[in-house]
Image (cartoon, grey):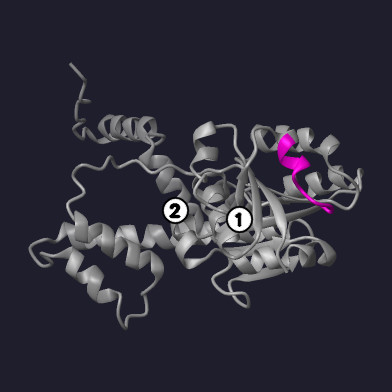
Amino acid sequence: MNLTLCMIGLGRMGGNMSRRIARAGHTVVAWDRALEARTALGNESRVLAAATLEALVAKLPSPKIAWLMLPAGAPTEDTLRALVPLLSRGDIVVDGANAMYRDSQRHAAELGEHGIQFVDAGVSGGVWGLENGYGLMVGGDSAAVGAIRPVLQALAPAPDRGWVHCGPVGAGHFTKMVHNGIEYGLMQAYAEGFALLHARDDLVSDVAAVAEAWREGTVIRSWLLDLAAGVLHDDQSLDDVAPEVADSGEGRWTVHEAVDLGVPVPVITAALYDRFASQGHADYGDKLLAKLRHAFGGHPVNAADKAP
């Protein structure tokens, strides 16, 4: 069954998801605040760009399906408020971006007052999703999830795998939150291991070759290792890369939830804190530590480098 739906937010994820859905035979009416994002989909025969939210919704048959791929916070909140008067009882809103699951539960309750159904869909796959398919973790009422099933099957690596109805509203974004916490820990372990190899270049002269060998037959092989091997193959010195790693909301949400539930997640927490340290948040504490060591033991303190 071919569906018509709208995609709101055409960034790195929303744009390619629109392409994949359209190439599976569905029709996507697409909107983004940025004209460039809308025109970038001009070559897709089954993607129709709309200039406004009102024009977007007007192109949809009933029951309408509106899929959002927007940053959490104000962009999502403002768009949901704008959509409510444009939608009708029985229509479906899907939030496929990263969002705090408690916010998704609240959104479902708010939209439910107007008879609008809500599905939270955690989506993984990044820039490779267009080619390889996306992993989807979905929360919502069975009827609502069933209505968007053809879209989920189009986005997934295959119709019968790579997507799961996790449970009621909130379950999708909760599961995606935990997924991203695991991702933090896995990437941290790879980074630390390769840093250790790099530190003994008298023993291991070609870290890229090790990464490539580990891709086959080892117990630590994975897609993330494949990506790491590709990075190191191109430049294993990494001299031109600043040692600063951004953190997004999912890592923090995962640790907060673990504290609330009393579930120990030391690896994920350490990975999150390492990102904080890379951003300079540990600098003041490290300076104080240096001064304390000097105060009690006379240990030397290195002078800070100051820009000319």
- Return the disc, 1 or 2, that comes first in the chain's sequence: 1
Residue 256 is left or right of residue 13, and the answer is: right
Q: How far from the left and from the top, in percent, is residue 224?
A: 39, 64
Span shown in magenta: 55-63
Q: Quadrant of residue 281?
A: top left
In the image, what residue occupies the spot 32% across and 80% down? 218
Q: Nearer the viewer, mark 1 or mark 2?
A: 1
Residue 79 rendering spot, x and y as whole percentages: 71, 35
Q: Secondary structure at mark 1?
A: helix
Measured as percent of width and height from the top left, residue 175 is found at 64, 61
Query: Which residue is depicted at the point 84% across and 52% down?
Result: 62
In front: 41, or 209? 41
The residue pinned by badge 2 equals 271
Residue 57 on the magenta span: yes
At a point 76% along the width and 41% down the height, the residue shown is: 57
The label on residue 177 is: 1
Near mark 2 (Cα within 10 A), the count class, few <14, some 14-19 or many ≥20, is: many
Out of 263 and 278, give the one closest to the viewer.
278
> Residue 284 appears at what percent x and percent y?
37, 30
Which residue is located at x 85 percent, y 44 percent? 111
**What is the quadrant of the N terminus in the image?**
bottom right
Q: Label 2's element?
A: helix
Residue extending farthest front? 45
Q: Amino acid at mark 2?
A: Ala
Q: Residues within 10 Å of mark 1 (few under 14, many from 20)?
A: many
The correct choice, above or below, for 49 with respect to 217 in the image is: above
- Residue 40 on the magenta segment: no
